[in-house]
Amino acid sequence: MSGPPGLDLDRLRAYLGDGPPLRATMFAGGRSNLTYAVTDGTSRWVLRRPPLGHVLPTAHDMAREHRVLAALSRAGFPAPTPVALCTDPEPIGAPFYLMEHVDGTIHRDAAALSALGPEAVHRLILSLVDTLADLHALEPAAIGLADFGRPEGFNDRQVHRWKKQLDASRSRDVAGIDELHARLAVDVPHGPPGGAVVHGDYRLDNVLIGPDLRVNAVLDWEMSTLGDPLSDLALLLVYAGRPLLTGPGGEVAPISVPGHPGLSELAGHYAKRSGRDVSDLHWYVAFAAFKLAVILEGVHYRYVQGQTVGEGFDTVGELVAPLVRQGHEALEGD
């Protein structure tokens, strides 16, 4: 195959038509869809395709990602502009889409983030929250996404959906995860009427940050839909306390970087920017921990099945149990 794993550049060149030879590199850090930087020497694009195996129903939908990017970029929200969509798996072996290459920094290195200084880190993270609130302020119907999801009953469906995802990705026993799901299912909040466009996996290393410390582009929209905006906020809070950044001796939680706002400040800043009530986040944080645990358990499943590409998958399974504990602790703090 001419290219990195999962992307045959000769076949891609043939699909795109005559032109200079293509070169590509795989982006590091992805744990789900595969993402590549592609260039013909003059133009630059980013290509997204599903993982090599174990693709669950409704997951890794390239057309859906393409649609939300097109709508958001037209509305002026910082999302990459898509340039091509191929739903036929024949050309490269899987559906894919191409989008514009956006410059910016993905912060995965704790030392590099710390080097910005506490004041800059604080401003950067609050910009992350501002961008999330701005996403939730968009009117779905006004940007062509009125039928992008069903906000009514969103939380109930999410509880059911992620249990199904867990059942489809079981390769071992995970203590407490089924009990956590059962507790979540007892008293599911209705959420605000009308809902909002939600990202579904919003965190520091899913955005490109510009030199002005603002968000140049939000990436990885595969789980976006119309739903409860507090689900995005809660997931951001959970991610802030989980190891995401590479640092000396291992991975570092973003909240450990000097200058990173505390969780209560993040929630309060979102409330001020959005005008939404965030006084009761306990259930949402617990569910966010459960959802992330299921996502990582799915990655672990693909790893043990030999269906992952790249490094770092061997330790993903170790992150699941702490998230399950966090979910139980959040509910007990209600």
Image (spheres, rainbow, N blue to C red):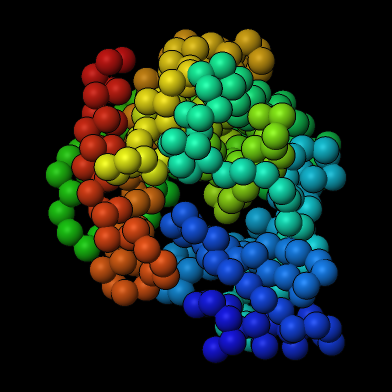
Which residue reaches farthest front?
115
Look at the image and tell me whether residue 290 can be seen: no
Which is more toward the observer, 119 or 325?
119
Q: In the picture shown, does residue 316 fall above or below 206? A: below
On the image, which quarter does residue 90 sit in?
A: bottom right
Indicate left or right for 93 with 157 as reference: right
Tell me what residue is drawn at x 75 percent, y 88 percent: 14
**In the image, residue 278 lies at what x, y percent?**
51, 14
Side (left or right) of 262 relative to 297: right
The residue at the point 73 percent across, 56 percent down is 101
Quadrant of the image for the C terminus?
top left
The percent coordinates of residue 59 (x first, y second) are 51, 60
Residue occupying the point 33% across, 60% down: 313
Viewer-proximal residue, 97 or 249?
A: 249
Numbered circles on residues, count: 0
Considering the image in quadrants, where does the N terminus appear?
bottom right
Q: Is 81 situated above or below 1?
A: above
Report whether 20 appears left or right of 133: right
Tell me if residue 35 comes above or below residue 231 in the rendering: below
Q: Residue at x 37, y 55 (%)?
A: 165
Query: Is residue 51 visible in this depiction of the protein?
Result: yes
x, y percent for residue 11 = 67, 87
Asked which quadrant contains residue 42, the reply is bottom right
Residue 157 image position (x, y, % from top left): 46, 43
